[in-house]
């Protein structure tokens, strides 16, 4: 419905609303319209154990359908506390009453956290490439995003660069490990370096840990909240979404020190009141699954990764093999035609190659770019879909590399 001219003249679109729809979600609709294989959006595909399905249905049938307390149902809060303690060998578990807040997915968790730590006129450091929502969230709340780049091709983090862009108005840095879109798992040294900088600057580290059950390294990924001295200045965000393939349940949580969590919980109360009640009940059952569930999950995703990585190698694409999450960030410089942007390239891949990917620009916000054109390819789908998508991708890229060379011979 269009707004009336009268309304248009009085109610201008505020400058802080996003300039368009999410590029990632837009690619999913484009894939559906074009009948292409969707290796764009990270919608996980992994069967939800029957018991968990039953737990959600049983909660609805037993009329567990009203708001819970804003911070979450006590059963789910206790399950989160126990899950985090067990998985992270925490000597002192999070207090379910004061150190956890259940939210509507990691997305609301991040927005509530940013509102709890940063006010208008302040700034927050965003690492690029990085998940599309962070810069948009900051724009929504009128907080400046300051950008720090990971170093291609290995995507290493240099904590000194955080200090270089920070000033007295910096409130926090957002870190995401395992990382979307590169699959990087930051090392203990990088995590320690980041913690040192946060302590020196007096800022908060917000760790989006949504992929922290999806790692292919021998060791569990490091958590900044584990670094001594960071207990009071780190906030960790997690969700059921990716580890149980239930992105539609909209259940996430935030953990951290009591003072910070009091603020997050107050914001959350007025943003959404509470997360969906029946899915909190099912979430309590999910977090009690034995370690074997997560081992199997990792092994399945490792196989998917290997299928995609094998095809990308065959096509001669340069990329860093992911150590976690389910994305590969590819350098597509040799395949892009002169004058063609990443978005046009992704469009061509979709329409001519029959496969959807995300153009790299989506992960840089308003940050300055260096380096060549990139695309992100997700391996969240089942093996057959990934194999088909990866074959189409490598076939098209293979044909296109020579095409680009013929059109523009080197030397
Ligand atoms: C890094 C990261 N954080 C958060 C989210 C969103 O999580 P949720 O669906 O729980 O809101 C995603 C989804 O792809 C993501 O990649």
Image: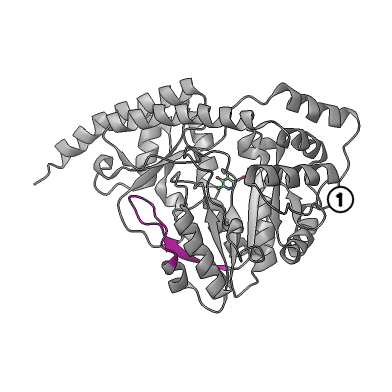
Q: Looking at this view, is 55 or 97 the one in front?
A: 97
Q: Is residue 276 visible?
A: yes
Residue 360: image location, x then y, percent: 41, 48
**Outermost residue to the front:** 91
Hey, which residue is sitting farthest bottom in the picture?
Answer: 168
Q: Is residue 409 left or right of residue 48?
A: left
The magenta-colored residue range is: 144-159
Asked whether mark 1 lies closer than 8 Å to ligand 1, one says: no
Q: Within the magenta stretch, is there residue 240? A: no
Residue at coordinates 70% horizontally, 49% vertically from top-left?
253
Q: Position of residue 65 (x, y in %)?
A: 87, 37
Q: Up-down: is 306 above or below 323?
A: above
Q: Is residue 158 magenta?
A: yes
> How is the rendered protein coloured?
one colour
Which residue is more in the foreground, 230 or 182? 230
Ligand 1 picture quarter: top right
Residue that label 1 marks: 69
The image quadrant of residue 115 is bottom right
SS type, badge 1: loop
Residue 286's spot in the image, x, y percent?
Answer: 72, 33
* Along the viewing direction, whichever of 202 and 9 lies nearer the viewer: 202
Left or right of 85? Residue 332 is left
Q: Residue at x 30, y 51 (%)?
A: 372
The reply to whether residue 1 is visible in this rendering is: no
Q: Where is 53 relative to 406, above or below? A: above
Residue at image position (25%, 33%) is: 400
Which residue sits at x=79%, y=30%?
A: 56
Up the image or down, 266 lies above or below 223; here it is below
């Amino acid at each position: 419905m269009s707004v009336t001219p009268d309304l248009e003249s009085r109610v201008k679109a505020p400058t802080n609303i996003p300039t368009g729809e999410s590029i990632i979600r837009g690619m999913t609709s484009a894939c559906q319209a074009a009948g292409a294989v969707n290796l764009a959006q990270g919608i996980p595909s992994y069967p939800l154990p029957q018991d968990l399905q039953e737990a959600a249905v049983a909660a609805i049938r037993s009329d567990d359908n009203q708001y819970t307390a804003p911070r979450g149902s006590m059963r789910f809060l206790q399950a989160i506390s126990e899950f985090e303690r067990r998985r992270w060998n925490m000597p002192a578990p999070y207090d379910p009453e004061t150190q956890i807040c259940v939210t509507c997915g990691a997305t609301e968790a991040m927005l509530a956290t940013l509102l709890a730590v940063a006010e208008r006129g302040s700034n927050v450091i965003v690492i690029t490439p990085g998940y599309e929502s962070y810069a948009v969230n900051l724009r929504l709340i009128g907080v400046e995003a300051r950008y720090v780049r990971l170093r291609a091709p290995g995507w290493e983090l240099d904590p000194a660069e955080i200090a270089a862009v920070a000033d007295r108005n910096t409130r926090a840095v957002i870190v995401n490990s395992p990382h979307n879109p590169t699959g990087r798992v930051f090392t203990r040294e990088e995590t320690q370096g980041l913690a040192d900088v946060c302590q020196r600057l007096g800022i908060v580290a917000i760790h989006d840990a949504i992929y922290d059950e999806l790692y292919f390294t021998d060791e569990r990924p490091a958590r900044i909240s584990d670094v001594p001295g960071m207990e009071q200045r780190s906030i960790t965000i997690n969700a059921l979404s990716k580890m149980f393939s239930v992105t539609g349940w909209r259940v996430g949580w935030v953990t951290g020190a009591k003072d910070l969590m009091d603020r997050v919980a107050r914001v959350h109360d007025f943003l959404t009141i509470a997360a969906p009640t029946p899915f909190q009940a099912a979430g309590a059952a999910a977090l009690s699954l034995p370690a074997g569930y997560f081992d199997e999950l990792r092994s399945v995703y490792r196989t998917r990764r290997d299928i995609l990585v094998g095809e990308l190698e065959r096509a001669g694409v340069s990329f860093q093999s992911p150590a976690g999450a389910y994305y590969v960030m590819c350098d597509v410089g040799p395949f892009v035609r002169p004058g063609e942007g990443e978005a046009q390239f992704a469009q061509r891949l979709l329409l001519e190659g029959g496969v959807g990917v995300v153009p790299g620009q989506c992960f840089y916000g308003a940050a300055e770019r260096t380096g060549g054109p990139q695309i992100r390819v997700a391996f969240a789908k089942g093996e057959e879909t990934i194999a088909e998508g990866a074959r189409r991708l490598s076939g098209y890229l293979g044909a296109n590399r020579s095409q680009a060379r013929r059109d523009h011979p080197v030397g």
